Image (spheres, rainbow, N blue to C red):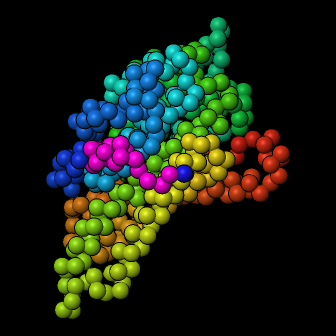
Amino acid sequence: MDLSWTSRQLSIRAEFASLGSRTDRDELRLGRRAFDQQTWDQLGGAGLWQMMVPTGFGGTGVDWWDVTAALEGLASTIRTPGLLLSVIAQAGMAYALDLFGTTAQKSDYFRRILRGELSATAIADPDTGTDVRASSTFLSPRANETFVLNGRKYNIAHAPVASFTLVVCKLEGHSRDGISLVLVDQNSKGVTIGPQDRKLGNLDLPTGQLTFEDVPLHYGHILGVPGEGLRNLVRFVSLGRLYYGLVAATLCEPMLAEALSYAKTRQTFGQPIVDHQYVQKKLTDMRIAADSAKWVSYGALHQLLSGAPEAVMSCSIAKLAGASAITDGAVDLLKLYGSRGYHEGEVSTFLRDALAFCSVGGTEEMHRRNIMNQMMRKARPAAKAAVEPARDLETA
C-alpha cells in the first residue's frame, strides 16, 4: 500500500482546497440556512462527479483515491460539514451504481449525477430506525414482473431536494431477511415528500421524510436482486463510513491551527496560555485524535477497494475515530476559548455541526455492535463463517 499522494492527487487536493476557501466565511459563522447550490455546481465544474463515473458513461473513470483527495482538500478549508456530507452521499450512490447497477441503470443515473442532480439514500424507518431487517417499508410483487412500494423513511439527507432516491426496503413475505434496494424518482406517483427537518446544526444539509404509497415499480428500478440486497448495502455504505471519519478528522485541522495561534497570544497570569499543560493536553489530544482517524480512514479505503474481509470493521472504526475526534475536539475548543467560544461564531457553529457525527453514518452503539460482530466472525473457523448470514449491519 502506497502511503503517499501522487502528484496528480496533490494537485486535485489543492484545487478543491482552493474551492472550499472561497466559500462565504461570514455566512458560515451564522450557519447557512439553505443548500449551497452555488458551491455544489462549482464542484461539478471542477470535475468531481466525473471522477466517480466510469469512462463508458461520461466520466473520467472511477478513481476513489482521486475522489478522496478532492474530498480531503475541500474539508481542509470549507469549515462546515453540511456540503461535505452531501458529497459523501453522492459518492455512495455512484459507488452503489458502479458495483451493482445494470447497464441501463448506469446509463440513466450516471448521466444525472454528471448533471449535478442530487441523490438520496433512504435507510431508516421511523419505527425501526436503522435495523433494516425489521424495516416496515415493503416491496410487494405484482403481476407481469412489477412491484409496489409502501412505507415511510425518515432522516434522509437531501429528501426535500433530491432528484432520485435509493430506498432500502424488505421483500413482502420475509421476516428479517429479504432486503431489497430500489431506485425511485422523487416525482413518481405515490411518493410524498415531507417538510424539511429542523436541526441543531448542519443547516445547509436539508433532511426530511419520504412516504411511499403503492409506488409502481418494475425490475428496472431494482438495484441488484430483490431480497438479496443486504450484503450489497453493507458494501456501499462502508465507503460513506470511512469518508465520515476522514472528513471529521480533516475538519479539525484548520480549527486546531487557529486554536494554537490563539493560545500563543492569549495571556493569563502573565504568560501565554499555550504554556499551561492543561491547554497543551487539549491541543495535543485533538492532534492525536485527528491524525489517528485520518490514517485509519486511509487504511479502510485501501481494504474496501481491495476486497479485504476486514474492510467492514475498519470502516466502522474509521467512522467512530473521526466522530470522537471532532466531537471531543469541538468541546475542548469551546472550553479553550471560554466565553468567546460560546458566543455566536465559528467555534460555536463548529460544535453544533460536529455533534451530527454522533449519529450521521450510524450511532456509536451501532458501530460497536458491527465491530463486535466482525470480531466474533473472525474468531470462528473460516468455513463456518462463510456459510453464516451477514450480521454486520444495523445501518445508516
11 in magenta: yes
Q: Residue furthest front?
A: 7
**222 over 241 or under it: above or below:** above
Residue 304, image x, y percentages: 57, 44
The residue sitting at 40% across, 26% down in the picture is: 59
The residue sitting at 20% across, 46% down in the picture is: 23
**Relative depth, front residue between 268 and 9:** 9
The image quarter in which residue 355 lies: bottom left
Residue 52, image x, y percentages: 43, 33
Q: Residue furthest bottom?
A: 269
The residue sitting at 31% across, 87% down in the picture is: 276
**180 over 11 or under it: above or below:** above
**349 over 81 or under it: above or below:** below
The image quarter in which residue 205 lies: top left
Q: Is residue 2 visible?
A: yes
The residue sitting at 24% across, 44% down in the picture is: 19
**Relative depth, front residue between 343 and 59:** 59
Task: Please report the bounds of the magenta region as a residue range.
Answer: 2-17
**Relative depth, front residue between 230 and 289:** 289
**Relative depth, front residue between 54 and 241:** 54
